[in-house]
Image (spheres, rainbow, N blue to C red):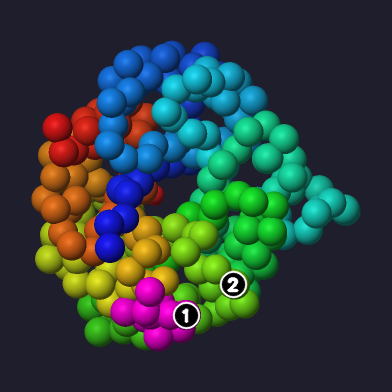
């Protein structure tokens, strides 16, 4: 079964309205003939300006987090409907930085994912192990837990995207080897087959993330089970276009 590749950027807490707009304008002609789906997930406050800058192009705009409640007394939070109002299509959920610094758990990942799906957004759910977990042979065990708890009660699992991001590879310049990324993503796909259905496992888009760049994207994207990338640092420059055009 063929899966359409999907390359997404994650700006994290970087860029301003002016620099973001310039980057998007520079990227538009560079990515216009992409064979994959393209998205930039940006800080919430930049969403209105970036959706405007990307209007009419093949760059979709995404968010970096979403709250699970529709509205209410949650100071500082943003709901799925608020994101939708500004044309957001995708939302990153459970990024390792949110798990590490902001108390995100598999339970809150699950609540946010269900809320995003309910509103018609496509969640990009991040999973991945810490260095000590990999070194002590616990990678699969960690992924089993993150997938079973984070994706609980999802009716159509093919409506989400999974980003496998080994925490030791994020922002470190230390990418997983092609074989390591392939092996782990194939494991995730198999697990989705067990937790949901084998057909869903063949259909679901699974990205790799962690120091993916213009130099290593070809090798990673050539792997059977890797359907795309979630790109941090390299999405802050026009290098992002080289990743989007990995097959050209
Ligand atoms: P990186 O970040 O590409 O800078 O390693 C990836 C991510 O955190 O999504």
The part of the image, by quadrant, that contains residue 137 is bottom left
On screen, residue 149 versus residue 85, left or right, reads left
- Secondary-structure class at tag 2: loop
> Disc 2 beta carbon < 8 A from ligand 1?
no
Check disc 1 and report the residue beneath it: 196
Instruction: Say above or below: 61 vs 128.
Output: above
Q: Left or right? Give the position of 150 relative to 165.
A: right
Q: Nearer the viewer, residue 138 or 144?
A: 144
Q: Which residue is at 24% across, 46% downward?
A: 212
Question: Is residue 41 shown above or below 177?
Answer: above
Say which residue label 2 marks. Answer: 154
Q: Position of residue 229 (x, y in %)?
A: 31, 49
Q: How many residues crowd around disc 2 within 10 Å: few (fewer than 14), some, or many (20 or more)?
A: some
- Please determine whether, in this image, residue 232 is positioned above or below residue 188: above
Earlier residue among tags 1 and 2: 2
Residue positioned 48% across, 26% down in the render = 15
Point 57% across, 36% down: residue: 43
**Residue 192 on the magenta span:** yes
């Amino acid at each position: 079964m063929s899966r359409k590749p999907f390359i997404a950027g994650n700006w994290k807490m970087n860029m301003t309205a002016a620099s973001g707009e310039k980057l998007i304008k520079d990227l538009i002609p560079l990515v216009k003939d992409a064979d994959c789906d393209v998205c930039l997930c940006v800080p919430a406050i930049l969403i209105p300006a970036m959706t405007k800058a990307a209007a009419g192009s093949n760059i979709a705009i995404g968010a970096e987090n979403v709250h699970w409640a529709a509205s209410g007394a949650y100071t500082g939070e943003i709901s799925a409907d608020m994101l939708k109002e500004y044309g957001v299509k995708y939302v990153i959920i459970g990024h390792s930085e949110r798990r590490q610094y902001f108390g995100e758990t598999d339970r809150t990942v699950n609540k946010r994912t269900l809320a995003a799906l309910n509103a018609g957004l496509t969640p990009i759910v991040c999973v991945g192990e810490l260095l000590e977990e990999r070194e002590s042979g616990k990678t699969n065990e960690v992924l089993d837990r993150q997938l079973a708890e984070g994706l609980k009660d999802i009716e159509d699992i093919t409506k989400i995207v999974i980003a496998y991001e080994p925490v030791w590879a994020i922002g470190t310049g230390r990418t997983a080897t092609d074989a390591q990324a392939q092996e782990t993503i194939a494991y995730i796909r198999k697990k989705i087959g067990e937790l949901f259905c084998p057909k869903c496992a063949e259909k679901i888009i699974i990205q790799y993330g962690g120091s993916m760049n213009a130099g290593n994207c070809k090798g990673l994207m050539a792997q059977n089970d890797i359907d795309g990338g979630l790109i941090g640092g390299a999405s802050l420059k026009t290098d992002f276009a080289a990743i989007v055009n990995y097959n050209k």
